Image (tube, rainbow, N blue to C red):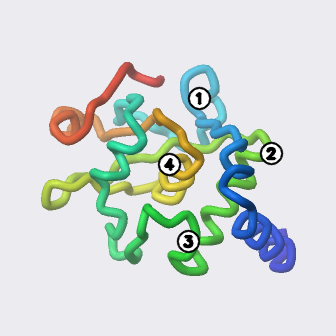
Amino acid sequence: MNDKELKQIINHYQRAPLAILERIKVQWACGEFSKHHSRDIDGYDVYWTDTKELVEQVAFGNMDRGEINYKKLFGNGPTSDQRIALTLHHWENGQYMDLPELGGINFGKLTIGDGRHRTIAAYHLGEKQMPIAIPKELTKDVQILIHLRKQAL
């Protein structure tokens, strides 16, 4: 994909009404579709959780990568807008995306090591539940902060 195509994709999704975006089917690479997961998630427990509860418990400015306001789908900077648009593009084209992976707990808030933009996109698309990969050693501590449902893998 060249720069011109990327800019067209970003503009397309930035201008699309939320009612149109909400028709995009969120597809996670887990469960029967885990073969689509691009990384090894050994060492993680994978659970379903409430999307709204998750985003409210995450510090989105973690790991020195800049603050992201989860209440805004776009407008968190060019890199963030690009990642959100590409996530929407993948889902709209029927592609499965890796589930977010928790990075830890910092001052009572969860941090996401990989998947911040996918989490925000799923939230804005109205996903009620989503899978999350949790390092096994953190699962019990995470359960104090958010409700975890059956394992997704």
Contact between marks 2 and 3 (CB within 8 A): the answer is no
Q: Residue at horizontal 46%, vertical 33%?
A: 129
Tell me the amino acid under the disc marked 1: Ser
Sooner in the amino-acid sequence: mark 2 or mark 3:
3
Tell me the amino acid under the disc marked 4: Tyr
How packed is label 4: few (under 14 Cα within 10 Å), some, or many (20 or more)?
many
- Where does label 4 land, which residue? 123
Tell me the amino acid under the disc marked 2: Asn
Tally of numbered tags: 4
How packed is label 2: few (under 14 Cα within 10 Å), some, or many (20 or more)?
few
* Local SS, label 3: helix
Sooner in the amino-acid sequence: mark 2 or mark 4:
2
C-alpha gap between disc 2 and disc 3: 20 Å
C-alpha gap between disc 2 and disc 1: 18 Å
* Local SS, label 2: loop
- Where does label 2 land, which residue? 93
- Where does label 3 land, which residue? 80
From what the image shows, is residue 67 above or below residue 31?
below
C-alpha gap between disc 1 and disc 3: 26 Å
How packed is label 3: few (under 14 Cα within 10 Å), some, or many (20 or more)?
some
Q: Residue at horizontal 38%, vertical 56%?
A: 113
